Image (cartoon, grey):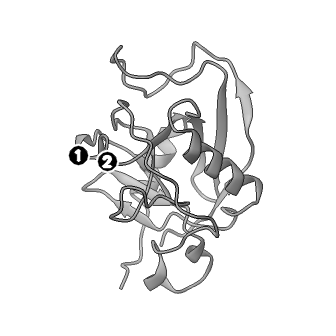
Amino acid sequence: MIPFTLLFLFFAACNDNNSNNTSNTNAAEPKPEPDAQVAVIETADYGRIVIELYPNIAPQMVERFKKLISEKFYDGTAIHRIDASLGIIQGGDPNTKENNVAAYGMGNSPYSNVPAEFSDILYERGTLGAARTRDVNGANCQWFITLKKQPEFDKKYTVFGRVIDGIKNAEIIMTAPTVKQG
């Protein structure tokens, strides 16, 4: 477990077509809506990560994420997985509110799983994906951010947003001290 917690602060509409982003520039890919929904991951020690959500690409996962944020489900959770070889940080597990490290990565919300919503958006640096079980329809509440290109994730994990600010903070998290699970 990483020694900090997350708070999802707010959703807002924005229409900043000049923002510096991390999205892939391939013209064939679906693009997020211009009036984007935004979530902010606030860490105690590593700053903010601002996420643009893709309701037009993964409507069910975005709705689940927004519902859990509005219920304060994520408040007090931690980033429980850092995998430098994959280049991902993962959070959203309610089990991280407890000290049972062996249970980290196994938690779900009280709601049923969200079906896969695969798209042509590629897993690039800054992509927000839905973590899931081995079942492609096994996404529930956990999420991950990629810090490098991950073509093996393409069309295998639901993309539901991207980092629009704070990617450097996510990179610093990647180097944070961790506790080995199990």
Looking at the image, residue 7 sits to the left or right of residue 154; the answer is: right
Q: Nearer the viewer, residue 106 or 17?
A: 106
Q: Nearer the viewer, residue 88 or 156?
A: 156
Residue 87, position as x, y percentages in the image: 32, 50
Q: Marks 2/1: CA distance?
A: 8 Å
Residue 124, position as x, y percentages in the image: 34, 35
Labels 2 and 1 touching (C-beta < 8 A): yes
Dot 2 corresponds to which residue? 156
Numbered circle sitting on residue 2: none
Residue 71, position as x, y percentages in the image: 76, 59
**Residue flagged by tag 2: what amino acid is it?**
Lys
Q: Nearer the viewer, residue 141 or 111?
A: 111
Give the answer, above or below, for where 133 lies relative to 22.
Answer: below
Please indicate, yes or no, whether residue 41 appears anywhere in the rendered image: no
**Eye-nearest disc, 2 or 1:** 2
Residue 170, position as x, y percentages in the image: 47, 48
**Residue flagged by tag 1: what amino acid is it?**
Glu
Mark 1 burial class by Cα count in 10 Å: few <14, some 14-19, many 20+:
few
Give the answer, above or below, for where 31 lies relative to 80.
Answer: above
Q: How many badges with numbers are in the image?
A: 2
Q: Secondary structure at mark 2?
A: loop
Quarter holding the C terminus? bottom left
Please indicate, yes or no, whether residue 42 appears anywhere in the rendered image: yes
Quarter of the image for residue 77 reads bottom right
Q: Nearer the viewer, residue 113 or 11?
A: 113
Looking at the image, residue 56 sits to the left or right of residue 80; the answer is: right
Numbered circle sitting on residue 152: 1
Mark 2 burial class by Cα count in 10 Å: few <14, some 14-19, many 20+:
some
Q: Residue at x 36, y 78 (%)?
A: 180
